[in-house]
Image: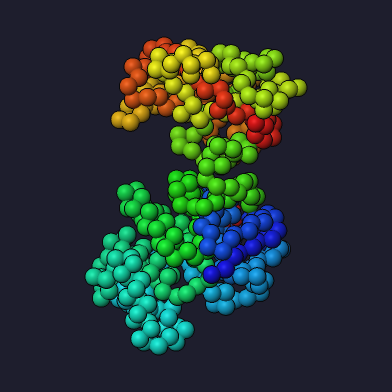
Amino acid sequence: MAAIEMKNIVKKYADGFPAVNDVSIDIADGEFLILVGPSGCGKSTLLRMIVGLEDITEGDMVIGGKRVNDKAPRDRNLSMVFQNYALYPHLTVYENMAFPLRLSKTPDTEVDERVRDASALLELDEHLDRKPANLSGGQRQRVAMGRAIVRSADAFLFDEPLSNLDAKLRGQMRTEIARLQRRLGITTVYVTHDQTEAMTLGDRVAVLKKGVLQQIASPRELYEQPVNLFVAGFIGSPPMNFVPAQVDGDRLQTPLGPIALTTDRQREAARGKDVLLMGVRPEAFEDAKLVDDDKRAKGDVFTAQVDVTEWLGNEQYAYIPFDASAEVSSQLKELSRELDSDQLRTQLIIAIDSTSRVRGGREADIWVDTRKMHLFDPTTGENLT
Ligand code: ATP
């Protein structure tokens, strides 16, 4: 096992544009790190530089204390699981898993022992004589993982390993991967564009946008303290709501109505500002009828015209369109493009209790927990709270 240190890593392809731009990440020995971001953000390129499939333009890649920039992939002792599994169709499950051990001329008895251990762990024992074509997608995925774990590699690297599976199987495999990683305790780097995978699997998550590292933190910290609008909008589903707001002393004037600035940080953030973007997660709202007086006093209530509600059993979502002025709307559109985010809509999506009688086509009083409100700089997207 080994720690992986990336120091000021830059990757420029032939067009000269930096696909990865000055990225520094330290991954601790045994840590499970997720690289996440939208298509084209450079996450696969970064993974391929760790494993040695891509040259590093600038910076140092250090694995287990040794600089590996010039080492061939086979000399890095890493195991990679690819999106398409890359299984050999003519070999059995057993031989697919044994393959890396055969390459390194491991004695037969040891090969057998390791393949049987891995297949027991992955519940593949009954399928060892089959060919990949006769396996389900999930089983193929497990064989690919089995092949990665039979070797005693220093780290596992996963490149979107679940993207070819249907939603249900993806959920199952996600827990299996988490369990496997915890059990083996091996340093793991996992690339995905799926924020749910990122949030549920990793010890820490690194969010990339256009080759630049935006934030690296625990899933909880990313969710509760996103550093900017991009991270705030990318992490969480349904996404954080963004509402343009005019600063008016200790209040914000918003298309939802006046909202009080509650915390010192919020008041500090608003000082000297004219316009801000208010960011509130769906669960920070509630049907005002269901909120007791004590709680009510800790937030604000506004009246809204509800468009549609979706009842999901354990909670429900209410969609509330709001009117931003034409000027603010065009500012938002500009910002959306700038931030690579399609989250800046003129509609709230809020999560309210499943017992709420709030319905589409009617007005409702909505409570918002103003302590949970983020304030973003409308030009830089920085989280000021
Ligand atoms: P995806 O989720 O779509 O795989 P990604 O975040 O993994 O995206 P990369 O594949 O790392 O992104 O690509 C990052 C940038 O580098 C993109 O703009 C891509 O077009 C560019 N790129 C990737 N591979 C090459 C290459 N071989 N030659 C030139 N440009 C490349």
Q: Quadrant of residue 64?
A: bottom right
Q: Quadrant of residue 28?
A: bottom right
User: Which corner quadrant of the figure contains ligand 1?
Assistant: bottom right
**Residue 34 at x, y percent in the picture:** 52, 54
Q: How many marks?
A: 0
Direction from residue 166 to residue 16 in the image, left or right:
right
**Residue 300 at x, y percent in the picture:** 53, 16
Direction from residue 278 to residue 96 in the image, left or right:
left
- Front residue of 224 and 67: 224
- Front residue of 200 and 134: 200
Above or below for 150 versus 168: below
The residue shown at (32%, 59%) is: 138
Direction from residue 295 to residue 170 in the image, left or right:
left
Screen quadrant of the C terminus: top right
Above or below for 254 versus 121: above
Q: Do we see residue 248 in this rendering?
A: yes
**Residue 344 at x, y percent in the picture:** 55, 30
Q: Do we see residue 277 in this rendering?
A: no
Screen quadrant of the N terminus: bottom right
In the rendered view, how is the structure colored?
Answer: rainbow
The residue shown at (61%, 69%) is: 63
- Front residue of 218 and 310: 218
The residue shown at (36%, 87%) is: 108
Above or below for 81 versus 341: below
Direction from residue 75 to residue 98 in the image, left or right:
left
The residue sitting at the right extreme is: 272
The residue sitting at the left extreme is: 126
**Residue 109 at x, y percent in the picture:** 35, 86
The residue shown at (56%, 64%) is: 29
